[in-house]
Amino acid sequence: MLALAEGGGGMLVLSAALAILAAAYLWSWARAKVTLPVARLWAFLAGLGTIWLAVGPVLGHLDQGNLTAHMVQHLLLMTIAAPLLLLGEPARVFHPAASARIQIPAPNPLLCWLAGTGIVLFWHVPAIFELGMRWHLLQQLTFLVTGLLFWIPVIRPWPTVTSWPRWSIPAYLFFATLPCDALSAFLTFCGRVIYRRYCFTGGVGITALDDQIRAGALMWFWVTIAYLVPAALVTVELLSPPARARGVAGAGP
């Protein structure tokens, strides 16, 4: 879908494609025989809206001269749009007649982890970064796809199933922060502009180095929140007594 935005009128094509997908989801939702919480509907629509915000006319052009804007784009795609789309349970909405017994093995969590963390490091190698900015929408598409892969073990959308225990998820998310933290720290404290295209830019009133420091600090803070908050929520879920046990306890004398 993101690749449709290449060339003249690309933003219009992208907006139309996202609108069509949103309409198809709403139509399927209205016809679905499976009842899902309305929050799932809003999650999917918000995910599509986040894609439009990141690569559409609002932010799509800003990262050519601003590293902080580039960082905002890829963080929106990987840590906001991707999990929201999965929370929308699109497979259940678009295939309501499918049996609830259908189960598809989820990708190995190690593969998902390597994809989600590795793509960030890969595209931020200086020489590869320049290539990615020339094939910009391909770069953004890989951020979205690997973001979807990364969040599958955490969200476990239907019909995927995994044999990995739920208690492994907090560790999965915690260790995912470390490569991003290392990259963020390097961008923040290295003291020189890493990417040549930003050597003479940075934004109104700031230098290119200041722009890089802001981008690194933003990524550091954003990834910490985006990964450790879900890790904390899963931990609380695991430590909480099962609903049935709480009900029995509440029914006591």
Image (cartoon, rainbow, N blue to C red):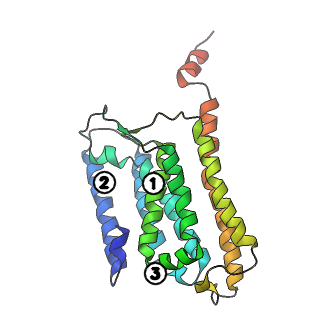
Identity of the residue drawn at 32% across and 43% down:
92
Q: Nearer the viewer, residue 114 or 42?
A: 114
First reached walking from the N terminus: tag 1 or tag 2? 2
First reached walking from the N terminus: tag 2 or tag 3? 2
Identify the secondary structure beneath mark 2.
helix
Question: Is residue 9 visible to us here?
Answer: yes
What is the quadrant of the C terminus in the image?
top right
Left/right placement of residue 101 relative to residue 167 reads left
Is residue 37 placed above or below 116 in the rendered structure?
A: above
From the top left corner, tell me how far across and down residue 217 is, in percent: 70, 68
Residue 26: which disc?
Answer: 2
Label 2 crowding class (10 Å Cα cut-off): few <14, some 14-19, many 20+? Answer: some
Identity of the residue drawn at 57% across and 69% down:
72
Residue 134: which disc?
Answer: 3
Q: Give yes or no for contact between labels 1 and 2 (Cβ–Cβ under 8 Å).
A: no
Distance (Cα) linking label 2 and label 3: 35 Å
Distance (Cα) linking label 1 and label 2: 21 Å
Residue type, mark 3 in image: Arg
From the top left corner, tell me how far across and down residue 135 is, in percent: 43, 77
Residue type, mark 1 in image: Leu
- Which residue does the numbered mark 1 point to in the structure image? 148
What is the quadrant of the N terminus in the image?
bottom left
Identify the secondary structure beneath mark 3.
helix
Question: Is residue 221 visible to us here?
Answer: no
Identity of the residue drawn at 71% across and 74% down:
213
Identify the secondary structure beneath mark 1.
helix
From the top left corner, tell me how far across and down residue 123 is, in percent: 53, 69
